[in-house]
Image (cartoon, rainbow, N blue to C red):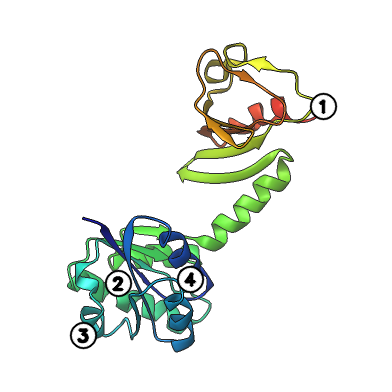
């Protein structure tokens, strides 16, 4: 049985979530008061509703009671949106929704949203700014993903003049406390083994603590 995911709030962030989830094996519900936002979502998925998420009856009518996970995606650029997020989370808890992820654009809002029942918090503005900072600070970083707390995954492009290096000689786990998870080479994904040789222009996915990753990114960058 497919997981049911609901997205409440269809601003740019919410619509991006709808598009991303539509590519996955889940059933989606999308809700917003704004008819134009719902229209845009309806071009991607079928279960869309123009509804007030602070109205418990409207949530029931949209099938929210059946959702396994609900994302409250309102931006808090206006005080009314923060109020709507809080009331919506309370209504979701009353309907028995177990997993609620809420968007928080300010650190102060995170604690409030958790207190009223959010089980997880996402901060898209913080994620975006940190991703940009990491990419600019390290020229060979293609992308960056925070996993949890201080643990990150970095996608790194190995410099074109890099000398081929057996992965066992790099000894990334012992010397840098870093694990190499995947290698992308010629548009193919490879799982590294003891026989793997790292090559120029490889893109590698590495995992470790934020403080340790810069030690190894410099190994793969231009001298």
Mark 2 / mark 1, whichever is N-terminal: 2
Question: Which picture quadrant has residue 91?
Answer: bottom left
64 to the left or right of 183: left
Question: Which picture quadrant has residue 197?
Answer: top right
Pointer 2 residue:
89
Q: Which mark is residue 166?
A: none
Residue at 64%, 36% (x, y): give it: 156
Residue at 53%, 77% (x, y): give it: 77
Mark 1 / mark 4, whichever is N-terminal: 4
- How many residues crowd mark 1 within 10 Å: few (<14), some (14–19), many (20+)? few
- In the rendered image, which quarter contains the C terminus? top right
Disc 3 secondary structure class = helix
Disc 1 secondary structure class = loop
Mark 3 / mark 4, whichever is N-terminal: 4
Pointer 4 residue:
15
Q: Which mark is residue 57?
A: 3
Mark 3 / mark 2, whichever is N-terminal: 3
Vertical placement of residue 163 versus 29, above or below: above
Pointer 1 residue:
223
Q: Indicate the position of residue 222 as horizontal and vertical percent values.
A: 79, 30
Vertical placement of residue 18 versus 195, above or below: below
Mark 3 / mark 1, whichever is N-terminal: 3
Question: Which picture quadrant has residue 119?
Answer: bottom left
Judging depth in this view, the residue of 103 and 220 nearest the camera is: 220
- How many residues crowd mark 4 within 10 Å: few (<14), some (14–19), many (20+)? many
**Mark whose residue sits in front, 1 or 4:** 4
Disc 2 secondary structure class = helix
**Mark whose residue sits in front, 4 or 2:** 4
Q: How far apart are the alpha carbons under marks 1 and 4?
A: 42 Å
């Amino acid at each position: 049985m497919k997981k049911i995911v609901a997205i409440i709030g269809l601003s740019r962030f919410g619509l991006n979530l709808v598009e991303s989830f539509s590519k996955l094996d889940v059933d989606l519900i999308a809700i917003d008061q704004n008819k134009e936002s719902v229209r845009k979502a309806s071009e991607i998925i079928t279960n869309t509703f123009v509804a007030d998420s602070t109205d418990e009856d409207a949530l029931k009518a949209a099938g929210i009671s059946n959702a396994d996970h609900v994302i409250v995606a309102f931006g808090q650029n206006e005080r009314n949106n923060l109020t709507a997020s809080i009331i919506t989370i309370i209504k979701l808890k009353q309907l028995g929704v177990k997993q609620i992820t809420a968007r928080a654009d300010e650190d102060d809002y995170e604690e409030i949203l958790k207190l009223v029942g959010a089980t997880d918090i996402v901060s898209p503005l913080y994620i975006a700014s940190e991703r940009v900072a990491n990419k600019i600070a390290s020229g060979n970083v293609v992308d960056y993903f925070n996993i949890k707390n201080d643990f990150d995954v970095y996608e790194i492009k190995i410099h074109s003049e890099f000398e081929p290096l057996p992965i066992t000689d790099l000894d990334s786990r012992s010397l840098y406390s870093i694990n190499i998870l995947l290698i992308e080479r010629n548009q193919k994904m490879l799982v590294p083994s003891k026989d793997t040789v790292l090559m120029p222009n490889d893109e590698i996915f590495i995992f470790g603590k934020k403080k340790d990753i810069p030690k190894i990114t410099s190994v793969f960058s231009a001298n």
